[in-house]
Image: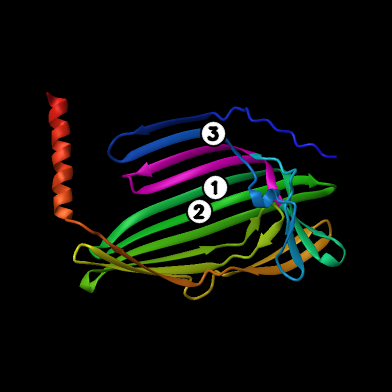
């Protein structure tokens, strides 16, 4: 009979120091420790069929993981932001493929010793023209996974690069459009599964009528490039190749209408603020 040890008291210190010259440069350093507990799906011991050849089974004996995080961030003119992060996670949640008779593959989460991550992120917003705002985000992570999973040694390394760009456009007839694009290199899912990179785009359009009615149309992954993830795993000599698909290509409509006298509400709000300022000054 297995026993689950529970301890609800621990120390999670967080320390940060920052400096700013109020004009061009800002610098911050932070150190912190946090905990991540497994969710219900990870703990539920009942099997859930994923396909004809694969199923998911939670692990009720899964232990939480602990993350020690170190971060250095530099900002130039409150626009260009560069951040370097180093973190060590112990007891990470790793997904393990196991073969059980005629059932095929069963994916079971287990605790792996640790993962180390050294990441660099860069973000920069830019107003290109009066009608075009652009924001770019670049993220690089070097991750190492290590552990001994019931006699199987895990030793994986990955260089992961992702890039996201957002464009805000002001079109004729007071129409506003947002176009975003995201692309990522191959990455590792939960310590043992290699996942191919993919990319996707999102498009949104909105227009306001009479300062009351707001109409929005959002199109997610219109080219259907981000719905399928191809993966492979080599755990204990068992090689698995497969893919998993999500319903990422969809379209949504939204309408919002403001009731009441908006000018009266604004005057009332300002009046209340003025009264409070007068009361404080007396």
Secondary structure under the numbered disc 1 in the rendered image: strand
Q: Which of 191 and 75 is in front in this view?
A: 191
Q: Name the residue under label 2.
A: 139
For label 2, the crowd category at 10 Å Cα-Cα, with few meaning under 14, some 14 to 19 and many 20 or more, is some
Total of numbered circles in the picture?
A: 3
| Kind of element beneath mark 3 | strand
Q: Disc 3 marks which residue?
A: 32
Question: Considering only order in the chain, which callout, 3 or 1, is on the residue closer to the N terminus?
Answer: 3
Q: Is residue 76 located in the magenta-colored stretch of the structure? A: yes
Q: Are marks 1 and 2 in contact (CB under 8 Å)?
A: yes
Q: Which residue lies furthest to the front in this view?
A: 260
Return the residue found at the far top.
282
> In front here: 205 or 187?
205
48, above or below 274, in the image: below
* Residue located at (18% from left, 49% from top): 265
- Residue 171 lies in the magenta-colored region: no
Q: Residues within 10 Å of mark 3 (few under 14, many from 20)?
A: some
**Residue 6, percent across and down?**
70, 33
What is the span of residues highlighted in magenta in the rendered image? 66-94
The nearer-to-camera label among 2 and 3 is: 3
């Amino acid at each position: 009979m297995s026993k689950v040890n529970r301890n609800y008291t621990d120390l999670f210190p967080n320390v940060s120091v920052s400096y700013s010259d109020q004009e061009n440069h800002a610098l911050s350093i932070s150190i912190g420790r946090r905990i991540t507990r497994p969710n219900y799906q990870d703990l539920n011991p009942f099997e859930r069929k994923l396909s004809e050849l694969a199923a998911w089974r939670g692990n009720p004996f899964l232990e939480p993981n602990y993350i020690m995080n170190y971060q250095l961030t530099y900002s130039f003119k409150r626009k260009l932001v560069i951040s370097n992060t180093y973190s060590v996670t112990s007891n990470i949640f790793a997904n393990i493929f196991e073969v059980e008779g005629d059932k095929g593959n069963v994916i079971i989460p287990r605790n792996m010793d640790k993962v180390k991550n050294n990441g660099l992120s860069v973000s920069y917003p830019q107003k290109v023209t009066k009608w075009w705002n652009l924001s770019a985000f670049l993220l690089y992570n070097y991750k190492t996974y290590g552990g001994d999973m019931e006699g199987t040694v895990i030793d994986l390394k990955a260089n992961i690069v992702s890039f996201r760009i957002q464009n805000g456009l002001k079109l004729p007839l007071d129409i506003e459009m947002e176009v975003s694009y995201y692309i990522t290199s191959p990455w590792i899912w939960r310590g043992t599964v290699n996942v191919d990179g993919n990319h996707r785009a999102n498009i949104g359009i909105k227009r306001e009528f009479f300062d009351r009615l707001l109409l929005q149309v959002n199109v997610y992954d219109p080219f259907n490039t981000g719905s399928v993830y191809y993966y492979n795993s080599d755990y204990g000599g068992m090689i698995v190749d497969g893919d998993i698909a999500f319903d990422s290509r969809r379209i949504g409509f939204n309408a919002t209408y403001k009731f009441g006298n908006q000018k009266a509400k604004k005057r009332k709000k300002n009046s209340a603020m003025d009264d409070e300022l007068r009361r404080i000054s007396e």
